[in-house]
Image (cartoon, rainbow, N blue to C red):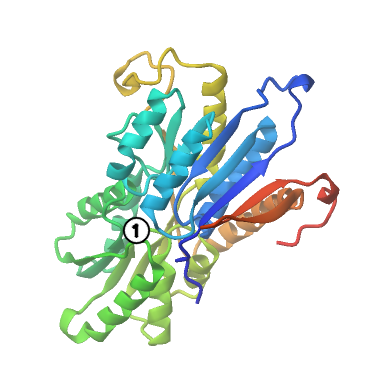
Amino acid sequence: MRHLTVPSRVVFGILLVFLVSCGTGHDSDEKYFLISTNVKIPYWQAGSAGLFQAAQQLKIRSEFAGPDSYDPKAEQKAFQEAVQGKASGILISVADPALMKDDIDRAIAAGIPVITVDSDAPASKRLFFIGTDNYHAGEIGGQRLAKELNGKGNVVVFTIPEQANLKERLRGYRDALEATPQIKITRVVDMKGDSRLAFDTATEVLGNDKKEHTDAFVCLEALAGKEVATVLSQHGVKDKVILAMDTDEDTLAWIQKSVIAATISQKPYTMSFVGLKMLDELYHHKLSTLSNDWAKDSFAPIPSFVDTGSSLVDKTNVDALIAASKSVTKSFCLLQTKLRVRMIFTATVPMTIFSISPAGANREPRC
């Protein structure tokens, strides 16, 4: 089993060849960043595909940076380095809103547009949030859970408590379950962004099942669902419900096998694609000031929230989603064949940089 816990910093950058003289309207020093944690998980591979596709269309430079593991301090460092590098704009999925607040505020004060995607930092001066209506996603999950349990049962929840998006999902679940008071959330597990903790805790819960009588597992982020499914499958357990989050390949495979009942699909590709285009627009058509509280302005030139949508995936539609995902993956692979990949080893961390390689433009994809 692969676990994403390497404490290295990985930067995925697409260095697009462009000529200002060709009339693109872009400056030679424009450079945009997407910052996250757990950058190698499938969720963020989809996010990076959206970033790179938008960058290719706009003929601008962009980089995807952040730690391999769930490491908020390493994410903070990646953000600080983007600011020091005079980024034209930054998208960030915030792991720890309290930790990142001052850094985001300083970037805004320095004239760098910052938009949060996927996970918000609402107390900061970020311009706005692009992502899932996480409360609604939790409601969708809660309603499906009540149906799966026939209105009665004990539930273990896996989450990362400090993340604002996961807090909202849990709130949505709780509110949806108010209509079925015999469904109890008996335990909320802080998995700290580590899939091994989800695996180990699920194993522990099964070991105590005669005492605790757990009927369902709810996974509020992308890593836990497939780990819980693996544990249940290895122990031959078929009488427990799993509700997962996101649509990586393993999660969808477990739905096909009827081990995971359903998952909630998000749109990280759309978040990054739309986010980069909005940053580009803000760079070329600057606001009068970045520090206004635009959310309270009835005539604001920017939104306060862009909902990219979410939906439930189960046995009835999983095959169609897999087919659609393969089509998008093929398109991204065609883009990757244009990239030259090289590893740069510094004194502390390795970095991966993707750059356009004209010689490889006609090669067949190998992803």
Residue 9 in sight from this viewpoint:
yes
| Relative image position of residue 26 (x, y in whole percent) | 66, 23
Identify the amino acid type marked 1: Leu
Nearest to the observer: residue 215 or residue 99: 99
Towards the viewer: 139 or 306: 306
In which quadrant will I find the C terminus? bottom right
Residue at 83% of width from left, 55% of height from top? Answer: 363
Q: Name the side, left or right, on which 138 lies relative to 81.
A: left
Residue displayed at 77% across by 58% down: 365
Q: Is residue 333 left or right of residue 314?
A: right
SS for dot 1 = loop
> Taking 51 as reference, is 229 left or right?
left
From this viewpoint, is residue 127 visible? Answer: no
Instruction: Name which quarter of the figure residue 147 lies in.
Output: bottom left
Q: From the viewer's perspective, is residue 283 above or below residue 75?
A: above
Q: Residues within 10 Å of mark 1 (few under 14, many from 20)?
A: many
> How many numbered tags mark residues here?
1
Q: Position of residue 340 (x, y in %)?
A: 74, 51
- Residue at the image position 51 percent from the left and 60 percent from the top: 41
**Does residue 60 sit above or below 9 in this rendering?**
above
The x, y position of residue 278, in whole percent, is: 52, 28
Q: Is residue 63 above or below residue 10?
A: above
Q: Which corner quadrant of the image does residue 144 belong to?
A: bottom left
Query: What residue does disc 1 label?
Result: 220
Give me the residue at 47% from left, 34% from top: 83
